[in-house]
Amino acid sequence: MISCPKCSCNTPAANIDLSDKLAKCDNCNAIFSIKDKVVELQFDTSNEQIAKPVGVDILEYNGQLELTLDQPTPILHILSVSFSPLLALISLGLFADKGIPLLIYVSVAFTFAFVFSLISLIRYKRNKIFVTVTKEDLAIEYRPKNFINDKFYSSKKIEQLFIKKDANGLTLQMVINEAEGQKTQKLIGRFTDITKAKYIEQEIERFLAIKNKRVSGEEM
């Protein structure tokens, strides 16, 4: 709530102009600046800390912060495990009904795809993402890589971290200060749990002494 500096009465929302950062008091008709209030509201002043969620490990030593989390499960493997058994049965049924030899091979292929994807999903639980932060650099490394290149950024250029939703789910992104201006860079994608994403954001900002600030389009 914004109060009039002259008479201390509360100012109704209809009398607040955020674009010009001005407000008018209904009680004494005073017009006053709310620039400081607008800037203050842009920052997350909540002192609530997010506890470390299951699935994220943290280690801080020798001026370095390391966060470890599971890699997101490949969508292709999930689809294969979900639909391959059904498609194998359909192919086998059509072979029994039509007697087309090719269908038995199709059924075997779907069965093989199911077994391969199931084993891959079980093994994928051991795949990790390593987020390493120092005062100089921030690194994102997938192990095993799974065709994903390691990413390295200058910590000194990071203005803000935030969570945003895209077509593949929640993503951890950051605003970087470059010579030509600010730009947004995606760090880690496909979070299914916003608590994990917010915890990683919180710990990186804490380590780098970045004050949390709301970014347009940021998820709560």
Image: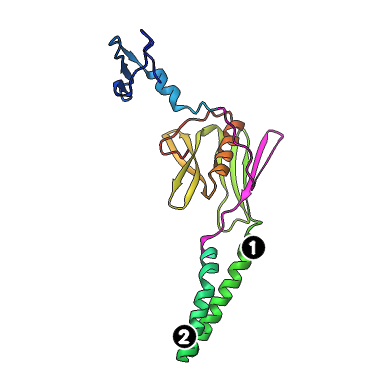
Is the N terminus in the top left, top right, bottom left or bottom right quadrant?
top left
Q: Nearer the viewer, residue 114 or 182?
A: 114
What scheme was used to colour the molecule? Answer: rainbow
Give the residue at x 41% y 18%: 36
Q: Is residue 38 above or below residue 154?
A: above
To which residue does mark 2 refer?
Answer: 94
**Numbered disc in front, either 2 or 1:** 2
Is 64 situated left or right of 9 in this image?
A: right
Q: Tell me the CA gap for discs 2 and 1.
A: 31 Å
Q: Nearer the viewer, residue 157 or 194?
A: 194
* Disc on the earlier residue, 2 or 1: 2
Residue 173: image location, x then y, percent: 49, 41
Magenta run includes residue 55: yes
To which residue does mark 1 refer?
Answer: 122
Label 1 environment density (alpha carbons within 10 Å; few <14, some 14–19, many ≥20) = few
Residue 148: image location, x then y, percent: 55, 54
Give the residue at x 53% y 81%: 107
Magenta run includes residue 167: no
Label 2 environment density (alpha carbons within 10 Å; few <14, some 14–19, many ≥20) = some
Which residues make up the magenta segment? 47-76
**Amino acid type, callout 2:** Leu
Is 36 situated left or right of 77 in this image?
A: left
Residue extending furthest toward the left: 29
